[in-house]
Amino acid sequence: MTDGANRSARDAGGPDEAVRPSARLPDALRLGPVRLAVSDLARSLEYYTRVLGLEAGRTDDASASLHAAGEPDPLVELVVRPGTSPIAAHSRLGLYHFAILLPTRTDLGRFVGHIASLGIRFGAAESRQCTLSPFELTMPEP
């Protein structure tokens, strides 16, 4: 597409101008754990350990931390909030999922076999990263 001066949209500062080098985060940057409000800590712990394979760390009556095997820092923190209920998708602003990146496709295949053996249904998820193979699991009610 060209403008009246026979310049392309890219030359004219149009929509194609958005092609820029990707920003790089500092190597020292570390993200903290995902904190989730749950109404039933025991049920949520069972799901995250049995299904996702995370290991329970510090746990008390009101919260628990979940870690990848052998890792000291938690990936997920579960915090009990009585009366917590699921939020309908797209009903409020917020973050409604988190991702766990498995190191290799072999690990991904092993995990898919694991959840299939548990009879857990899962489906493909949309990815804007062509190098990833995302899929979605439905988490238990909070």
Image (cartoon, helix red, strand yellow):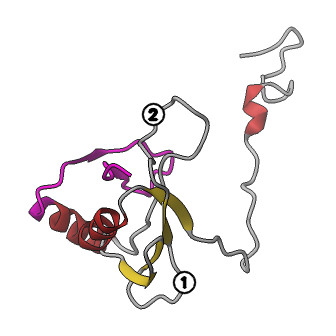
Q: Is 121 left, or right, of 134 in this rendering?
A: left
Q: Position of residue 133 (x, y in %)?
A: 36, 55
Give, as a three-letter code, the residue at label 2: Ala
Decide: few, some or many residues near mark 2? Use Cα within 10 Å; few <14, some 14-19, many ≥20.
few
Mark pair 2, 1: CA separation? 30 Å
Q: Nearer the viewer, residue 62 or 95?
A: 62
Write the residue at 39% across / 70% down: 102
Which of 68 and 109 lies nearest the eye of the viewer? Answer: 68
Count of marks placed on residues: 2
SS category of the residue bearing label 2: loop
Residue 5 shown left or right of residue 43 in the figure: right
Identify the residue under disc 2.
89
Q: With 114 as the anchor, is 123 left or right in this view?
A: right
Tell which circle, 2 or 1, labels the residue nearer the N-terminal end.
1
Residue at the spot of label 1: 73
User: Could you tell me which residue is drawn at 51 percent across and 78 percent down?
Assistant: 74
Question: Which residue sits furthest top?
Answer: 4
Q: Is residue 132 magenta?
A: yes
Which residue is painted at 73% across and 41% down in the image?
A: 19
Residue 97, position in %: x, y? Answer: 47, 50
Q: Which residues are magenta?
A: 116-142
